Amino acid sequence: MSATATRCGRSTRAARCAFRSSTRAENEAFSFLHLAIGPDGTIYATWQYGDDGQPSGLTAFSSSGQRLWSFTPGGGSPSAPVVDRDGTVFIAVDNLLEALNPNGTALWSYTVAGASFCTALVIDSDSSLYALCDQTLYAVR
């Protein structure tokens, strides 16, 4: 996956970014899924090729649009990322919760036993992670 973020900037109303991407092959559909902005202005975008289990992942961009790193988990498409005040990035893929350091390296992962799919990640003021997995709310940390 190659992608660059262009025309990124902050305004008093919202951060606006236009992403330009290229796909591995002309017949594959590439799309960004979700965005989050970290405390340092880093932009995190989840993405996937197609919709039939092809590769998906998370890419970090600087606030000026420079690609910083990419993380490609196994499994399905990642959830919307959430970022805590220290810059730790959290995503869910199927029933796996993933925590990444601000530099994109894996910090920890946790498999929610008995769940098939986790969504709706949120972080509270104490940096506890909450995930909705198969209609059950889980707290992690």
Image (spheres, rainbow, N blue to C red):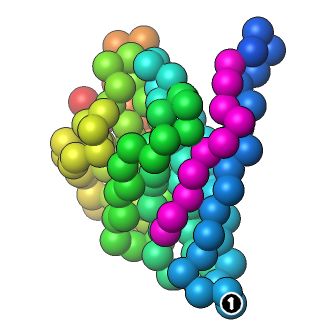
The rendered magenta stretch, by its main secondary structure, is classed as strand
Is residue 5 on the magenta stretch? yes
Give me the residue at 62% from left, 70% from top. 22
Give me the residue at 66% from left, 32% from top. 8
Give me the residue at 61% from left, 45% from top. 5
The quadrant of the picture occupied by the C terminus is top left
In the depicted structure, whether residue 140 falls above or below residue 21: above
Quarter of the image where one finds residue 100: top left
Residue 1 place in picture, x, y as percent = 49, 68
**Viewer-closest of 94 and 19:** 19
Residue 26 place in picture, x, y as percent = 67, 87
Q: Amino acid at mark 1?
A: Asn
Is residue 134 on the magenta stretch? no
Give me the residue at 80% from left, 14% from top. 13
Quarter of the image where one finds residue 33: bottom right
- Please give the residue where the numbered disc 1 appears in the rendered image: 27
Relative placement, left or right, of 8 versus 110 is right
Relative placement, left or right, of 133 versus 18 is left
| Magenta segment | 1-10
Residue 65 place in picture, x, y as percent = 56, 38
Name the element at disc 1.
loop
